[in-house]
Amino acid sequence: MLRHTDLCSGIGGFSLGFQWSGLSEPVLFCEIDPWCRKVLAKHWPDVPIANDVEELANDPARLVPDCDILTAGYPCQPFSVAGKQRGTEDDRHIYPHISEIIAHKRPAWVCLENVYGHLSLGLDEVLNDLANQDYAARAFIFPSGAIVGAPHHRNRIFIIARHVANASREGLQGEVGQGQAGAQ
């Protein structure tokens, strides 16, 4: 089972989906919202929960466990059409801290999520940053509102990135074996 660090965890959607699929087990959550941390603690009582991505980024070698997958649904307010769209000038723009963690931990896979407004405000910077760290990344637009039957559209952007500097590895768990999830 792959090891999964879940930043900006919310109530654990990424971890729940990956766990249900048999892909990974969470080894660390990071969530600023106290109510969400309570939900995470209830469902994953043995997984540590940090509350500040910037603090983790200041010392990832000590504070972030080795992981094969890193996910983050980082704050959307800097990019949302419902907000002021200040992008990198917004104090809530924390992708640079997430990037710092990625640079130090080098997970085999990175999966990020944000609002559709990120497409025209900051997405290129994220994709370029990942490329500069030896990740092959693709962004996908997911029409979430329409799929669940909502009368409105709430398109989301998902960025899936694979560390390609050593593509023969599945991750920190070892070499890719026949029949393992994600085998190429």
Image (cartoon, rainbow, N blue to C red):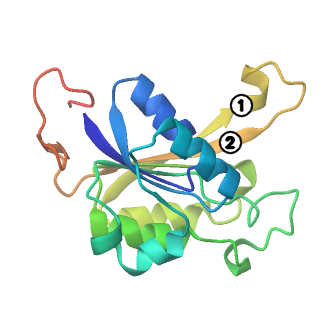
Residue at image coords 52%, 64%: 126
Marked residue nearer the N-terminal end (1 or 2): 1
Mark 2 belongs to which amino acid?
Answer: Arg
Pointer 1 residue: 144
- Observer able to see residue 138: yes
Determine the image quadrant of residue 148. top right
Residue at image coords 40%, 23%: 21
Residue at image coords 40%, 48%: 47
Placement of the N terminus among the 4 image quadrants = top left
Report the side of 160 relative to 4 (left or right).
Answer: right
Q: Residues within 10 Å of mark 1 (few under 14, many from 20)?
A: some
Pointer 2 residue: 156
Q: Residues within 10 Å of mark 2 (few under 14, many from 20)?
A: some
* Residue 111: mark: none
Element type at mark 1: helix
- Residues at discs 1 and 2 in contact (Cβ within 8 Å): yes
Image coordinates for residue 91, horizontal then vertical, percent: 70, 78
Image coordinates for residue 90, horizontal then vertical, percent: 73, 77
User: Label 1 vs label 2: CA separation?
Assistant: 7 Å
Report the side of 152 relative to 120 (left or right).
Answer: right
Image coordinates for residue 57, horizontal then vertical, percent: 43, 75
Determine the image quadrant of residue 87. bottom right
